[in-house]
Image (spheres, rainbow, N blue to C red):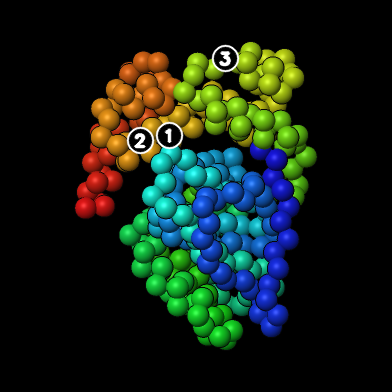
Amino acid sequence: MKAQYEKIEHQEFRSFGAYAYEKAEFDTPWHYHPEYELTYILSGRGIRYVGNGFEYFEENDFVLLGPNLPHCWRNTGVQRGNSGAIVIHWDNKLLGNNNPELHAIAGLLAKAQHGIKYHAGFSMKIKEKLLVMLQQPSFERLITLLSILHELSTTGNGELLNTTAVDASVRNYDHQRINTVYQFVRSRYQEKVTLSQIASEVHMSEEAFSRFFSKVMTKPFFTFLNEYRINAACQLLIETDQPVSDVAMASGFETLPFFYRQFGKFKKLSPKKYRDNFRRASG
């Protein structure tokens, strides 16, 4: 997917941006910018793309992103209304250099280049601070941001979204080809997909495409495809009462044993356990 550069504009007399928005769906293209970003999802559900990874998201999704880390949120499935988020942007100048009082926060920001996701239970505790921040004058708003970052730096609830750091500003790959692959998978993941099909979409030989995709995304294409299918399955497990066998077929898997193996590989538990855990946490 081609990551577009986005210029972040701040209001006059404010050194960082903090705002909330609501729209019919998340439609910002896959993009990057030199600022750090905190995004809290107030409403909406779908697939979150960060770097070379992606997973299902819903309300209370909360992530920290480092500079030049490509990302976007895209709605999938049936929505319960508009999609909304709180977004905060700031650059390296905001917190200065090597301040000993900010040592823990500096460590957090060093990890942000991988993308960090926070668990829903913890995230919901931060939500109130974020809502308060939006109404505060400049000085109090800065203090609240520092308080939030300090809390994030001392919690054990953060989970890295990418095993390797990704920086769009230094990547020289053919992003348009990756964009074509994303669009193809999004529309055809429920069908049988062959290497010949996807290679022809980007006008490459099968061997050349395999090398290209693995280099850009740091994973083979079929690993990427199965990971996408598993995230689609997670959405069905959460939103429907369909039997696991039906979920597997609807997500593009031809056999149930292979679905179970792939689900365990990516989610580290069974589909039934995943559904039960979600309903227990939501109930």
Say whether disc 1 or disc 3 marks the residue closer to the N-terminus: 3
Helix, strand or loop at mark 2: helix
Q: Residue at label 3?
A: 194
Type of amino acid at the residue the image marks with label 2: Leu
Residue 258 located left or right of residue 93? left
Q: Residue at label 2?
A: 236
Residue at x 49% of width, y 44% of height: 75
Residue 17 horizontal/vertical position (percent): 62, 71
Say whether disc 3 or disc 2 marks the residue closer to the N-terminus: 3
Residue 241 horizontal/vertical position (percent): 25, 34
Q: Residue at label 1?
A: 232
Distance from Cα at disc 1 to Cα at disc 2: 7 Å
Check if mark 1's residue and mark 2's residue have beta carbons within 8 Å.
yes
Type of amino acid at the residue the image marks with label 3: Thr
Helix, strand or loop at mark 1: helix
Residue at x 57% of width, y 57% of height: 65
Residue 202 horizontal/vertical position (percent): 71, 23
Residue at x 64% of width, y 73% of height: 16
